[in-house]
Amino acid sequence: MSFSELGLIPEILQAVTDAGYSEPTPIQRQAIPVVLAGHDVMGGAQTGTGKTAGFTLPLLNRLARHASTSTSPARHPVRALILAPTRELAMQVFESVKLYSKHLPLRSTCIYGGVDMNPQIQELRRGIEIVVATPGRLLDHVQQKTIALGQVEFLVLDEADRMLDMGFIPDIRRILALLPANRQSLLFSATFSDEIKKLADQMLKNPQLIEVARRNMVSETITHIVHPVSSGLKRNLLAHLIRHEDPSNQVLVFVDTKFACSRLAHFLERHDISADSIHGDKSQQARTETLDNFKSGKIRVLVATDVAARGLDIEDLPSVINFELPHTAEDYVHRIGRTGRAGKKGKAVSLVSAEERHRLADIQKLIKLEIRQEVIHGYEPETDFFEGEAGRRRKAPAASSRQQSESSPSDRRKPSERERPPPRGRKPNHIAPDGFDFSKPYEAPKDLSQQPGSAAGREIHKTQRPIAFLLGGLGRKA
Ligand code: AMP
């Protein structure tokens, strides 16, 4: 099937051709006709499936009748509102909107927190048809009466599950109350919990359900592997794994906290692996620079927190490494959505210590897959990692061999494989053998401390909800 069969206008087809797309992806094939027909949509699709074009192309098509070259702001009211959970995702969606609307006189902008509001206000004053926004900053504009939402015809809620995780649902409900009831609404989410379904019930009218991947499932082109390892040896194992990868392969490493994020990137740098980190304590500018450096290949390893990495569109990423397993199984799906995109092969590697076994069990249950485990010699897990399944495992790591191997971590003998262990809790151990403490608070980077007046710099010291803190210390303002 070609794009021209979907009923899109020539200006949009031209933009698609310019983007180099030869045929629509499955979500685009399904979503475009449904959105063009004016239906509400509940879309189950992960990042990397082409869902952004799936909703943006038909949305632009429907807005094209309003396209006007008039300079009067009154001729350019906000007609489409696209909500995204993070600044990075909002910017990415905005880039797509600009790309696909380049042959149409439709105006678009992106508004997100952590930066000065004034340029956004100037932009909105000009008159803008399509606004891509994070919820908190949008509400700031509403409060300051710098945006009017009374003529919104289209609402897109992207990554709704992440909105939920980040505590944005009350903000979303406030925004919904400000929009005309007569509108077309689209909700996209990679996973569908009961809460998401409840939100969809409130937001959508007779929605058409569009799903390209099975619920909560991950791309089948991804190979999953778990390396059981003692928490104290994780950093060394990470460096070891990266060193033994093809040097041209870039790696995205996920950590649980921003505390660990920069520290881990520095550790890799000290071990001659070019790395940088992206997390909420960094200024927007620093985050953008880091991302650009990663995308252009200047840095090989990007260490990220879940929130900072959300929705990042990084092409051809062959592997994702979970330095720690995420607390919620859904986040595993999100994290590894950065690899194995658009049918390409990907590798999802997880370093799992004994204390994380229950998380592993949750993930396996969610993705309905028993992940292969491989102990790398010299980087064995805590002795209780396989406890409770002595009869099932093929070969347990001997304490003595572990001691011996810690002194020769680069030894690469063939790893032994083990069966999946049952979940079991364990006290956390954040101290690496060299005394490095992952639980220590992260020190704010220079770019923040040098900007005492910046929003990010100011708000970082406030008492905040934990999830908001991850958002660059900006409270509910994304
Ligand atoms: P998304 O899932 O929207 O984040 O898109 C993932 C990537 O797929 C982006 O880099 C898009 O530019 C690209 N893409 C979207 N649609 C197509 C298509 N029909 N053919 C090839 N690439 C596409």
Image: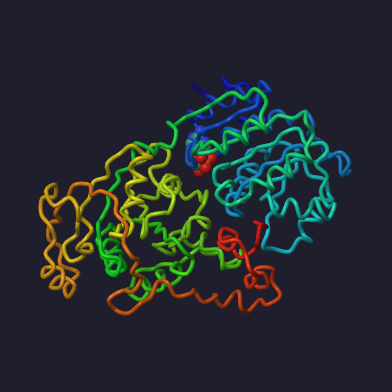
Which residue is at 79% across, 34% downward?
A: 180
Relative to 182, is 238 on the left or the right?
left
Image quarter in which the C terminus is found? bottom right
Instruction: Say which of 382 and 320 sits in front.
Output: 382
Q: Position of residue 102 (x, y in %)?
A: 67, 40
Which residue is at 37% across, 73% downward?
A: 267
The image quadrant that residue 229 belongs to is: bottom left
Instruction: Say which of 353 and 457 sits in front.
Output: 353
Q: Position of residue 215 (x, y in %)?
A: 44, 33
> Is residue 279 shown above or below 40?
below
Relative to 394, is 379 on the left or the right?
right
Relative to 109, is 411 on the left or the right?
left
**Colour scheme:** rainbow
Q: Position of residue 250 (x, y in %)?
A: 37, 57
Which residue is at 12% across, 61% downward?
A: 413
The image quadrant that residue 340 belongs to is: top left
Relative to 304, is 404 on the left or the right?
left
Instruction: Say which of 411 and 144 sits in front.
Output: 144
The image quadrant that residue 458 belongs to is: bottom right
Q: Position of residue 270 (x, y in %)?
A: 35, 76
Q: How many marks?
A: 0
Q: Is residue 228 visible?
A: yes
> Is residue 101 shown above or below 478?
above
Q: Is residue 20 visible?
A: no
